[in-house]
Amino acid sequence: MSGPLTGKVALVTGAARGQGRSHALRLAEDGADIIAVDICGQIDTVLYRMSTPEDLDETVAEVEKLDRRIVARQADVRDAAALNQAVAEGIGELGRIDIVVANAGIAPMSVRESDDLQTFLDTVAVNLTGVYNTVHSVVDRLIEQGEGGSIILTGSTQALSGRGGNGSGAQDGYTASKHGVTGLMRTWAYWLAPKNIRVNTVNPTGVDSPMVNNEVVAEWLEKDPDAAGVLANHMPVPVVAPRDISAAVAWLASDESRYVTGVALPVDAGFLIK
Ligand SMILES: NC(=O)c1ccc[n+]([C@@H]2O[C@H](COP(=O)([O-])OP(=O)(O)OC[C@H]3O[C@@H](n4cnc5c(N)ncnc54)[C@H](O)[C@@H]3O)[C@@H](O)[C@H]2O)c1
Protein backbone atom coordinates (compact mmCIF):
# COMPACT_ATOMS: atom_id res chain seq x y z
CA MET A 1 0.00 0.00 0.00
CA SER A 2 1.43 3.39 -0.85
CA GLY A 3 1.03 6.64 1.08
CA PRO A 4 2.14 10.25 0.80
CA LEU A 5 5.62 9.40 2.16
CA THR A 6 6.25 6.17 0.24
CA GLY A 7 9.90 5.93 -0.85
CA LYS A 8 11.04 8.43 1.78
CA VAL A 9 13.20 7.88 4.84
CA ALA A 10 12.66 9.72 8.13
CA LEU A 11 15.05 10.12 11.05
CA VAL A 12 13.23 10.40 14.40
CA THR A 13 15.12 11.06 17.65
CA GLY A 14 13.62 10.14 21.01
CA ALA A 15 11.78 7.39 19.13
CA ALA A 16 11.67 4.78 21.92
CA ARG A 17 8.40 6.00 23.40
CA GLY A 18 5.99 8.93 23.79
CA GLN A 19 5.71 11.38 20.91
CA GLY A 20 8.82 10.04 19.14
CA ARG A 21 7.32 6.55 18.87
CA SER A 22 4.02 8.04 17.77
CA HIS A 23 5.76 10.12 15.07
CA ALA A 24 7.69 7.07 13.83
CA LEU A 25 4.47 5.08 13.57
CA ARG A 26 2.51 7.85 11.86
CA LEU A 27 5.29 8.48 9.31
CA ALA A 28 5.53 4.72 8.70
CA GLU A 29 1.74 4.55 8.24
CA ASP A 30 2.18 7.25 5.61
CA GLY A 31 4.79 5.07 3.86
CA ALA A 32 8.18 6.22 5.18
CA ASP A 33 11.00 3.96 6.36
CA ILE A 34 12.42 5.00 9.72
CA ILE A 35 15.78 5.63 11.35
CA ALA A 36 15.00 5.61 15.08
CA VAL A 37 17.45 6.93 17.66
CA ASP A 38 17.08 7.09 21.44
CA ILE A 39 19.39 7.23 24.45
CA CYS A 40 17.47 4.35 26.14
CA GLY A 41 19.06 5.28 29.43
CA GLN A 42 18.97 7.71 32.32
CA ILE A 43 20.44 11.20 32.77
CA ASP A 44 21.25 11.89 36.45
CA THR A 45 19.35 15.17 36.74
CA VAL A 46 16.18 13.68 35.23
CA LEU A 47 14.19 12.25 38.12
CA TYR A 48 11.44 10.55 36.10
CA ARG A 49 12.27 7.28 34.37
CA MET A 50 13.62 7.72 30.86
CA SER A 51 13.33 5.13 28.10
CA THR A 52 14.77 1.60 27.99
CA PRO A 53 16.11 -0.61 25.17
CA GLU A 54 12.83 -2.57 25.45
CA ASP A 55 10.90 0.61 24.65
CA LEU A 56 12.94 1.05 21.46
CA ASP A 57 12.38 -2.64 20.61
CA GLU A 58 8.64 -2.01 20.89
CA THR A 59 8.87 0.89 18.42
CA VAL A 60 10.76 -1.40 16.02
CA ALA A 61 8.12 -4.13 16.34
CA GLU A 62 5.25 -1.67 15.77
CA VAL A 63 6.87 -0.11 12.68
CA GLU A 64 7.61 -3.56 11.26
CA LYS A 65 3.97 -4.52 11.79
CA LEU A 66 3.16 -1.72 9.34
CA ASP A 67 5.44 -3.41 6.84
CA ARG A 68 7.97 -0.59 6.82
CA ARG A 69 11.71 -0.89 7.35
CA ILE A 70 13.33 0.55 10.48
CA VAL A 71 16.92 0.90 11.64
CA ALA A 72 17.04 1.59 15.39
CA ARG A 73 20.13 2.65 17.31
CA GLN A 74 20.84 3.62 20.88
CA ALA A 75 22.64 6.98 20.84
CA ASP A 76 22.69 10.14 22.93
CA VAL A 77 21.89 13.26 20.90
CA ARG A 78 24.48 15.14 23.01
CA ASP A 79 27.18 12.87 21.59
CA ALA A 80 27.69 14.06 18.00
CA ALA A 81 30.09 11.23 17.10
CA ALA A 82 27.73 8.49 18.31
CA LEU A 83 24.76 10.16 16.65
CA ASN A 84 26.60 10.60 13.33
CA GLN A 85 27.55 6.92 13.42
CA ALA A 86 23.96 5.81 14.16
CA VAL A 87 22.54 7.99 11.41
CA ALA A 88 25.20 6.92 8.90
CA GLU A 89 24.30 3.28 9.57
CA GLY A 90 20.61 4.07 9.07
CA ILE A 91 21.20 5.91 5.81
CA GLY A 92 23.60 3.14 4.72
CA GLU A 93 20.85 0.56 5.17
CA LEU A 94 17.85 2.54 3.97
CA GLY A 95 19.63 4.37 1.18
CA ARG A 96 18.59 7.99 1.64
CA ILE A 97 17.15 10.64 3.98
CA ASP A 98 14.21 12.99 3.39
CA ILE A 99 12.65 13.88 6.73
CA VAL A 100 14.17 14.75 10.09
CA VAL A 101 12.16 14.90 13.30
CA ALA A 102 14.40 16.27 16.07
CA ASN A 103 12.16 15.27 18.95
CA ALA A 104 14.39 13.94 21.77
CA GLY A 105 14.09 16.06 24.89
CA ILE A 106 14.00 16.19 28.66
CA ALA A 107 11.95 18.25 31.12
CA PRO A 108 13.35 17.57 34.58
CA MET A 109 10.76 19.63 36.56
CA SER A 110 10.84 18.55 40.17
CA VAL A 111 10.28 19.76 43.70
CA ARG A 112 12.92 17.38 45.00
CA GLU A 113 16.45 18.43 45.91
CA SER A 114 18.32 19.04 42.67
CA ASP A 115 21.48 20.66 41.35
CA ASP A 116 19.99 23.67 39.57
CA LEU A 117 22.99 24.57 37.43
CA GLN A 118 23.62 20.99 36.33
CA THR A 119 19.91 20.57 35.55
CA PHE A 120 20.02 23.74 33.43
CA LEU A 121 23.15 22.57 31.60
CA ASP A 122 21.80 19.07 30.94
CA THR A 123 18.49 20.41 29.66
CA VAL A 124 20.17 22.81 27.25
CA ALA A 125 22.60 20.09 26.15
CA VAL A 126 19.80 17.66 25.24
CA ASN A 127 17.07 20.02 24.03
CA LEU A 128 19.19 22.54 22.13
CA THR A 129 22.65 21.11 21.40
CA GLY A 130 20.97 17.76 20.72
CA VAL A 131 18.79 19.36 18.04
CA TYR A 132 21.87 21.04 16.55
CA ASN A 133 23.69 17.68 16.46
CA THR A 134 20.68 15.89 14.98
CA VAL A 135 20.25 18.23 12.06
CA HIS A 136 23.98 18.43 11.40
CA SER A 137 24.12 14.61 11.33
CA VAL A 138 22.07 14.62 8.10
CA VAL A 139 22.02 18.04 6.53
CA ASP A 140 25.06 17.56 4.26
CA ARG A 141 23.48 14.40 2.88
CA LEU A 142 20.11 16.16 2.39
CA ILE A 143 21.83 18.95 0.46
CA GLU A 144 23.89 16.48 -1.61
CA GLN A 145 20.78 14.49 -2.54
CA GLY A 146 19.43 17.67 -4.10
CA GLU A 147 15.79 16.62 -3.77
CA GLY A 148 14.71 18.92 -0.95
CA GLY A 149 13.52 17.69 2.41
CA SER A 150 11.57 18.54 5.54
CA ILE A 151 13.12 19.17 8.95
CA ILE A 152 10.75 19.31 11.90
CA LEU A 153 12.04 20.37 15.30
CA THR A 154 10.02 19.71 18.44
CA GLY A 155 9.59 22.97 20.29
CA SER A 156 6.95 23.53 22.94
CA THR A 157 4.56 26.25 23.98
CA GLN A 158 7.57 27.10 26.18
CA ALA A 159 9.45 27.97 22.96
CA LEU A 160 7.08 30.91 22.52
CA SER A 161 6.01 31.83 26.05
CA GLY A 162 7.53 32.23 29.51
CA ARG A 163 4.34 31.31 31.33
CA GLY A 164 4.96 29.22 34.46
CA GLY A 165 8.51 30.48 34.98
CA ASN A 166 9.73 29.79 38.52
CA GLY A 167 13.50 30.42 38.45
CA SER A 168 14.44 26.74 38.73
CA GLY A 169 17.30 25.31 36.67
CA ALA A 170 14.78 22.95 35.08
CA GLN A 171 12.30 25.63 34.05
CA ASP A 172 15.01 28.09 32.95
CA GLY A 173 16.77 25.36 30.98
CA TYR A 174 13.60 24.10 29.36
CA THR A 175 12.26 27.50 28.31
CA ALA A 176 15.66 28.79 27.17
CA SER A 177 16.45 25.62 25.21
CA LYS A 178 13.05 25.56 23.51
CA HIS A 179 13.32 29.27 22.61
CA GLY A 180 16.75 28.35 21.21
CA VAL A 181 15.10 25.70 19.05
CA THR A 182 12.88 28.42 17.56
CA GLY A 183 16.05 30.33 16.70
CA LEU A 184 17.69 27.32 15.07
CA MET A 185 14.50 26.73 13.05
CA ARG A 186 14.52 30.31 11.78
CA THR A 187 18.20 30.47 10.85
CA TRP A 188 18.10 27.03 9.19
CA ALA A 189 14.87 27.85 7.32
CA TYR A 190 16.65 30.88 5.86
CA TRP A 191 19.79 28.90 5.03
CA LEU A 192 18.04 25.93 3.46
CA ALA A 193 15.05 27.43 1.61
CA PRO A 194 17.04 27.94 -1.62
CA LYS A 195 17.80 24.20 -1.52
CA ASN A 196 14.11 23.31 -1.15
CA ILE A 197 14.72 22.02 2.36
CA ARG A 198 12.04 23.26 4.72
CA VAL A 199 12.50 23.77 8.45
CA ASN A 200 9.63 24.21 10.90
CA THR A 201 8.85 23.57 14.55
CA VAL A 202 5.85 21.87 16.05
CA ASN A 203 4.95 23.43 19.40
CA PRO A 204 2.93 21.14 21.64
CA THR A 205 1.08 22.04 24.81
CA GLY A 206 1.09 19.33 27.51
CA VAL A 207 1.08 15.89 25.87
CA ASP A 208 0.04 12.66 27.53
CA SER A 209 3.46 10.97 27.46
CA PRO A 210 5.74 9.52 30.17
CA MET A 211 7.44 12.94 30.38
CA VAL A 212 4.41 14.43 32.15
CA ASN A 213 2.57 11.31 33.18
CA ASN A 214 4.82 10.31 36.08
CA GLU A 215 5.06 10.55 39.86
CA VAL A 216 7.65 13.38 39.82
CA VAL A 217 5.33 15.70 37.89
CA ALA A 218 2.36 14.61 40.03
CA GLU A 219 4.35 15.57 43.14
CA TRP A 220 5.34 18.93 41.57
CA LEU A 221 1.72 19.78 40.74
CA GLU A 222 0.57 18.72 44.20
CA LYS A 223 3.12 21.00 45.91
CA ASP A 224 2.32 23.91 43.58
CA PRO A 225 -1.43 23.79 42.92
CA ASP A 226 -1.31 27.14 41.06
CA ALA A 227 0.96 25.62 38.38
CA ALA A 228 -1.85 23.46 36.99
CA GLY A 229 -4.03 26.55 36.46
CA VAL A 230 -1.19 28.60 34.98
CA LEU A 231 -0.33 25.82 32.55
CA ALA A 232 -3.95 24.97 31.63
CA ASN A 233 -5.13 25.09 28.02
CA HIS A 234 -7.87 27.46 26.89
CA MET A 235 -9.76 24.63 25.18
CA PRO A 236 -11.31 22.22 27.67
CA VAL A 237 -8.69 19.46 27.42
CA PRO A 238 -6.01 18.86 30.09
CA VAL A 239 -3.41 17.32 27.76
CA VAL A 240 -3.42 16.35 24.09
CA ALA A 241 -2.46 12.92 22.74
CA PRO A 242 0.86 12.11 21.03
CA ARG A 243 -1.17 11.35 17.85
CA ASP A 244 -2.37 14.97 17.78
CA ILE A 245 1.24 16.13 17.48
CA SER A 246 2.07 13.37 14.98
CA ALA A 247 -0.69 14.61 12.69
CA ALA A 248 1.03 18.01 12.50
CA VAL A 249 4.43 16.35 12.01
CA ALA A 250 3.04 14.20 9.19
CA TRP A 251 1.61 17.27 7.46
CA LEU A 252 4.88 19.20 7.79
CA ALA A 253 6.75 16.13 6.46
CA SER A 254 4.49 15.81 3.42
CA ASP A 255 4.29 17.72 0.16
CA GLU A 256 0.91 19.07 1.31
CA SER A 257 2.97 21.69 3.16
CA ARG A 258 5.55 22.08 0.38
CA TYR A 259 5.83 25.87 0.63
CA VAL A 260 5.59 26.10 4.43
CA THR A 261 8.93 26.93 6.03
CA GLY A 262 10.16 29.01 8.95
CA VAL A 263 6.95 28.41 10.88
CA ALA A 264 6.38 27.60 14.56
CA LEU A 265 3.17 25.57 14.54
CA PRO A 266 1.41 25.34 17.91
CA VAL A 267 -0.72 22.29 18.61
CA ASP A 268 -1.73 23.75 21.91
CA ALA A 269 -5.49 23.70 22.50
CA GLY A 270 -5.42 27.50 22.73
CA PHE A 271 -2.64 27.70 25.36
CA LEU A 272 -0.84 30.56 23.61
CA ILE A 273 -3.88 32.77 23.07
CA LYS A 274 -4.63 32.99 26.79
N1 LIG B 1 5.02 15.85 26.98
C1 LIG B 1 4.81 17.14 26.91
O1 LIG B 1 3.93 17.67 27.61
C2 LIG B 1 5.58 17.99 25.95
C3 LIG B 1 5.07 19.27 25.65
C4 LIG B 1 5.77 20.07 24.74
C5 LIG B 1 6.92 19.60 24.16
N2 LIG B 1 7.38 18.36 24.50
C6 LIG B 1 8.61 17.90 23.82
O2 LIG B 1 8.28 16.79 23.05
C7 LIG B 1 9.44 15.97 22.86
C8 LIG B 1 9.09 14.53 23.14
O3 LIG B 1 8.74 14.38 24.50
P1 LIG B 1 7.71 13.28 25.04
O4 LIG B 1 6.55 13.99 25.54
O5 LIG B 1 7.52 12.23 24.03
O6 LIG B 1 8.54 12.74 26.31
P2 LIG B 1 9.20 11.30 26.61
O7 LIG B 1 10.03 11.51 27.82
O8 LIG B 1 8.14 10.27 26.66
O9 LIG B 1 10.09 11.00 25.32
C9 LIG B 1 11.31 11.64 25.09
C10 LIG B 1 12.26 10.62 24.48
O10 LIG B 1 13.50 11.27 24.22
C11 LIG B 1 14.54 10.42 24.65
N3 LIG B 1 15.74 11.19 24.99
C12 LIG B 1 15.89 12.06 26.01
N4 LIG B 1 17.15 12.53 26.05
C13 LIG B 1 17.80 11.95 25.00
C14 LIG B 1 19.13 12.05 24.52
N5 LIG B 1 20.04 12.80 25.14
N6 LIG B 1 19.46 11.35 23.41
C15 LIG B 1 18.54 10.57 22.78
N7 LIG B 1 17.27 10.42 23.22
C16 LIG B 1 16.91 11.11 24.31
C17 LIG B 1 13.97 9.74 25.88
O11 LIG B 1 14.69 8.57 26.22
C18 LIG B 1 12.54 9.46 25.45
O12 LIG B 1 12.40 8.23 24.79
C19 LIG B 1 10.51 16.58 23.77
O13 LIG B 1 11.36 17.40 23.00
C20 LIG B 1 9.70 17.42 24.74
O14 LIG B 1 10.46 18.47 25.27
C21 LIG B 1 6.74 17.55 25.37
Image (cartoon, rainbow, N blue to C red):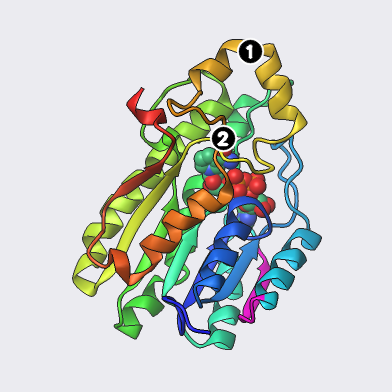
Where is the C terminus found, in terms of image quarters?
top left
Mark 2–mark 1 Cα distance, whole angstroms, equals 18 Å
Residue 261 % position (x, y): 26, 58
Tell me if residue 244 comes above or below residue 87 in the rendering: above
Residue 37 seen in render: yes
Q: Which residues are magenta?
A: 66-75
Q: Is residue 179 left or right of residue 78?
A: left
Tally of marks: 2
Residue at point 59% right, 74% down? 85
Give the camera-side residue of 42 and 227.
Answer: 227
Categorize mark 2 by other alpha carbons within 10 Å: few (<14), some (14-19), many (20+).
Answer: some
Of labels 2 and 1, earlier in sequence is 1
Q: Amino acid at mark 1?
A: Asp
Q: Secondary structure at mark 1?
A: loop
Q: Report if residue 71 lies within the magenta region.
A: yes
Residue 142 % position (x, y): 37, 77
Residue 239: image tag: 2
Categorize mark 1 by other alpha carbons within 10 Å: few (<14), some (14-19), many (20+).
Answer: few
Q: Is residue 192 left or right of residue 206?
A: left
Tell me if residue 247 comes above or below residue 237 in the rendering: below
Marks 2 and 1: which is nearer the front? 2
Residue 126 seen in render: no
Q: Which residue is mark 1?
A: 224
Residue at point 44% right, 40% down? 178
Within 8 Å: ligand 1 and the Cβ of disc 2? Answer: yes
Tell me if residue 34 comes above or below residue 51 in the rendering: below
Q: Amino acid at mark 2?
A: Val
Residue 257 % position (x, y): 29, 63
